[in-house]
Amino acid sequence: MMESEMKEYFQVLWKRAWVIVGMVLLLCSGTGVYSYLTDVPVYEASSKLIVNTSDRQEGTVGPDFNQITSNLLLIETYKEIITSRTILEKVAAEYPNLVTAVNELSSKVSIGSTSRSQVMSITVKDSSFATAVQLVNGIAEVFQRETPNIMNVNNVTILSKADITDPPVKVSTGVLFKVIIAFVLALILSIVIIFIWEYLDDTIKTEKDILEIGVPTLAIISRIKKNDLIGDTRNSKKKSVSDAFQIGINP
C-alpha cells in the first residue's frame, strides 16, 4: 500500500516536472545574478601576535614551561581585551578616516588562536584591502602598547604584520550559499504547488478516478495512438473512393 502511494506521488511529480525545473532555474538564476550585481566584495588582512615570557632570569637556558602555561591561559583573556572598547576606541581615534564608530570596527574584527599555541591572529574584514591592512596593524600596535598598562606585564610581541603589497585575500561573499538556499526553497515551493494543483484538479483522467467517485461505468474507451488514427483515416478515404467508384460504374 505504501509503495503504491509513493509511486503515485512520484508519477504526479514526474507529470509536472517542468514546474520544478522552471521554478529552480528561475529562482537560482535570479538569486545568482542579483547577488553578483549587488554584493560588495570583502577582503581580509591578518596580523599575528605571540604571547611570550616577560622576564627571563639570568643564566636560564631554554623555555620556562611554567611561564608558557601561564601565557596560554592569558590568551583567552587577551582575546577579550583586543575586542574591548578600551582598545578599539584608541584605534578609532588614531584612524578617524578609516572608521567612525567602535561598533563598526568591532564587527570587522575577529581573533583566533590554535590549541596549545602562544600565537594569536587578528583578522579584519573590509571592502577595501588597504583599509583592512591599516586597521589590523593598528589594532596589533595599540594592543601591544596598552598591555603593560592593563595587565602590568609586557609579554606581547608582534610576530608579523599585514602587508599592503601582499595579494588581496578576497573573502567569499556567500553567492554560492544563497544559490543553494534558493535551490532548496524552489524545490520545496514547486512540489507544494504541484500537489495543490493536483488536489484542485477534479477532471477525470483514468478509470480509477471514476471508481473513486462511485459513478457506474457504462463503457471503456481504450487509449488510441495517433498512428492508429492516421491509418484509420487513410483506410476510410480509400473505402470512400472505392464505394464511389462502384456507384459510378453501376447504373
Image: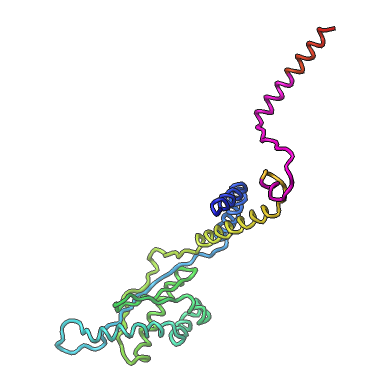
Name the image colouring: rainbow
Q: Is residue 130 magenta?
A: no
Q: Is residue 110 above or below residue 11?
A: below
Q: Which x, y percent locates residue 114?
A: 33, 75
Q: Which x, y percent locates residue 225?
A: 65, 32
Q: Residue at x 35, y 91 (%)?
A: 151
Q: Main secondary structure of the magenta part?
A: helix
Q: Is residue 201 above or below residue 156?
A: above
Q: Which x, y percent locates residue 162?
A: 37, 71
Q: Is residue 216 above or below residue 246?
A: below
Q: Quadrant of the C terminus?
A: top right
**Residue at the extreme right of the image, as rendered:** 251
Drawn side of residue 215 relative to residue 34, left or right? right
Q: Nearer the viewer, residue 94 or 21?
A: 21
Residues in magenta? 208-237
Task: Say which quarter of the image contains residue 248.
Answer: top right
Q: Which x, y percent locates residue 208?
A: 66, 46
Q: Nearer the viewer, residue 90 or 199?
A: 199
Q: Residue at x 24, y 89 (%)?
A: 55
Q: Is residue 223 magenta?
A: yes
Task: Say which quarter of the image contains residue 220.
Answer: top right
Residue 18 appearing in the image: yes
